[in-house]
Amino acid sequence: MAWGDPTVVSSEGTACSGAADPTACLAKLAELRPADGIFPDLDGYPHRATQVVYTRHDEVGAVTSAQELATFLKPITDAKTAGFLVRENGYDISCGGDERNARPSGDGFDIIGQIGGGCGRRDRTEDLLHVSKDGQITVLSSTVVERADPNCSPGRRPEGFAMAGASVDASPLGRFFAEAAELEAASVPAFLRLAEELAHHGAPADLVLHACDAARDEIRHTAMMTSLARRFGAEPSTPVVPPRPVRSLFDIALENAVEGCVHETHAALYATHQARHAADRRIRKVMKRIAEDETRHGALAWSVAAWIESLLSDEERARIDQARSDAVTTLMNGTAEPHPDVVRIAGAPSAAQASRLLHAVAGELWAA
């Protein structure tokens, strides 16, 4: 069940069956509000937390962690229970569901599941898992089915930046926000360099000023994302961005076409979706502010493009158009299914939603 607005996700059997006082048992069940869940409430900010609640005769209780769930379910004697445990540990079940996927093996079941993938540091793998009778999950083999691409993450990345990423031991939400914080931090020197280079080449003063303002925005975004990452148990890595000499107008325009016109526009789109769909109130508030800023950053990128590209040759503009088109294609081919927590709690678009959003923007903006 999910508390906050209590919703029954699924149920088995009859509540309070066999209780000496069924009425009292049902009343206790209705009043049960566990403080924690398999996806727990943290730092006092409420979001949907998943629990398994149960009755055993007159006993009413709740399971509030993945470890407790394994203990509660054992012995694992059927494929449906084995599949449920695997899913609650973050896997997507492959090959048509639990019963068709799982097969008895040794003291339990073997199941194929997929985990990871999308923007970030972790590959998406298809794992052969063994679920023992006592609820222990062991990875028997693992095959990479989709390489993770840190470069598909929204936002402006500076030249020479290599993403370190969050610890693989962090929760899915922790990793998501830690990697977002690292990308936001990397955007600070990216905008400072842009401002310096624009000034060097005699760009209009308002473009230089807006690039400096964007760097300040990214400092604030870094603090917001760091706070969310720590809330979900992860510590962001500090980006290392080596200093670079001032580039030519063409090289600036080439980077701006990809990192600004495509990635900053994508970041604004992504943040707007989160601001509207995150189940967590605090995340919605944070992403609303970030979406407003990223929309301005995207507009800045197009303004920079208009100024610089007017000074370039036809051949150079054609190369920039091709780079922008290639970046859009990379984004559209890089959509993968985020972890369910990231979709539900953080409001990230699912793979299908991301694809629809990208195609809509490609038709209205990037094709122009």
Image (cartoon, grey):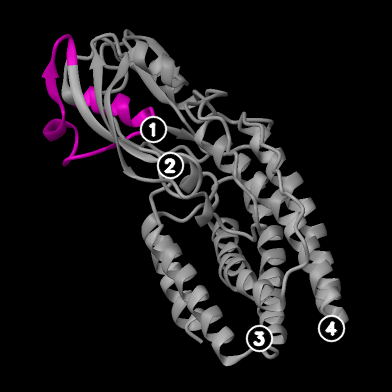
Identified at 24% across, 23% down, the residue is 81
Three-letter amino acid code of the residue under disc 3: Glu
Residue 87 magenta-highlighted? yes
Q: Which residue is mark 1?
A: 90
Task: Find numbered disc 3 in the image and state the secondary structure of the residue it sits on.
Answer: helix
Does residue 13 appear in the picture of this structure? no
Could you classify mark 3 by the number of other residues whose Cα lies within 10 Å: few (under 14), some (14-19), or many (20 or more)? Answer: some
Q: The magenta stretch spans which residues?
A: 80-108
Spatial distance from mark 2 to mark 4, Cα to Cα? 44 Å
* Sequence-first tag of 3 and 4: 4
**Disc number lying in front (3 or 4):** 3
Q: Secondary structure at mark 2?
A: loop
Q: Which residue is identified by label 3?
A: 309
For discs 2 and 3, the disc positioned in front in the rendered view? 3
- Which residue is labeled 4 in the image? 204
Residue picked out by circle 2: 339
Q: In the image, is residue 330 part of the stretch drawn in magenta?
A: no
Tags 1 and 2 touching, CB below 8 Å: yes
* Rendered location of residue 95, percent (x, y): 17, 40
Q: Separation of disc 3 and disc 4 at Cα?
A: 14 Å
Position above or below: 345 against 336: above
C-alpha separation, residue under disc 1 versus residue under disc 4: 50 Å
Residue 91 x/y as whole percent: 34, 34
**Residue flagged by tag 4: what amino acid is it?**
Pro
Place of residue 343 in the rendered image (x, y in percent of width and height, measured from the top left): 47, 48
Taking the image as shown, residue 288 lies to the left or right of residue 210, namely: left
Classed neighbour count for the residue bearing mark 2: other residues with Cα under 10 Å, few (<14), some (14–19), many (≥20): many
| Residue type pointed to by label 1 | Gly
Question: Quarter of the image holding residue 145?
Answer: top left
**Residue at position x 52%, y 38% from top?**
48
User: Mark number for residue 296?
Assistant: none
How far apart marks 1 and 3 lie (CA) works out to 46 Å
